[in-house]
Amino acid sequence: MQDLSKMRQEYDAESLNEADMASDPIKEFMEWMDEAIAAKLSEPNAMVIATSTSDGKPSARVVLLKEVNDCGFVFFTNYLSRKGMELLSNPFAAVVFDWHDMGRQVRIEGRVEKLSAEESDNYFNTRPENAKTGAWSSPQSKIIKSRDELDELQKETERMFAGKTIYRPSHWGGFLIRPEVIEFWKGRQSRMHDRIAYYKTEDGWSINRLAP
């Protein structure tokens, strides 16, 4: 194995200044996302989401952001998966977008709530057919005996819906993350990175610079 301690990248990103940033961090995020898309990054909407059990045991994985609105950030999952169960029992999450090729990260913390059935239906109905059957077929996060077992579950679902409309299973749907903290990070030289954090207040948002 190579010596990981010697792996180091120097960043040349321009300075991140509070005065140049939007007063609303969701608006600022949308601008950063547009720039990440324009830069043709691979899956710029991929985000690491960390959840925890009610007694504080954490877990993290990558999911896809599917919507940003004035209320926050939306993603979809199996409610019976590990992350789904953890969010239902402890409705808080932390998220990281790592746009490393641009020397940027965004970190989000907030309370999580389920979307309405109608909102989940609206998104589910836009999904490709194989993604719809996958939502029915996979007992997400559960131990299975083999890949063959998973393939057979998929075939059973396809037989069940043959010639029929594939509707959303009740165990699958969306979550909304209502942000309480949003931090924007830009890599700078000598590891003196820029970090600008927005904190939710009764009057809106406060903007603060954090030490790297």
Image (cartoon, helix red, strand yellow):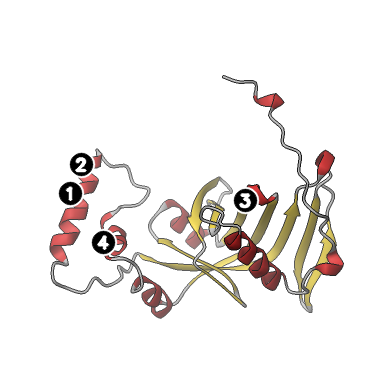
Q: Report the Cα–Cα distance between label 3 and label 2.
A: 34 Å
Q: Report the Cα–Cα distance between label 1 and label 2.
A: 6 Å
Of the image marks 3 and 2, the number of the one nearer the N terminus: 3
What secondary structure is marked by label 3? Answer: strand
Confirm or deny contact between disc 1 and disc 2 (CB under 8 A). Answer: yes
What secondary structure is marked by label 2? Answer: helix
Q: Identify which residue is drawn at 75% across, 52% down.
A: 186
Residue under numbered circle 4:
133
Of the image marks 4 and 2, the number of the one nearer the N terminus: 4
Tell whether 81 sits left or right of 177. left
> Does residue 108 sit above or below 61 in this rendering?
below
Query: How far across and how far down the image is residue 26, in percent?
Result: 67, 71
Of the image marks 4 and 1, the number of the one nearer the N terminus: 4
Q: Identify which residue is drawn at 21% across, 74% down.
A: 165
What secondary structure is marked by label 4? Answer: helix
Q: Amino acid at mark 1?
A: Glu
Q: Amino acid at mark 2?
A: Asp
Residue under numbered circle 3:
98
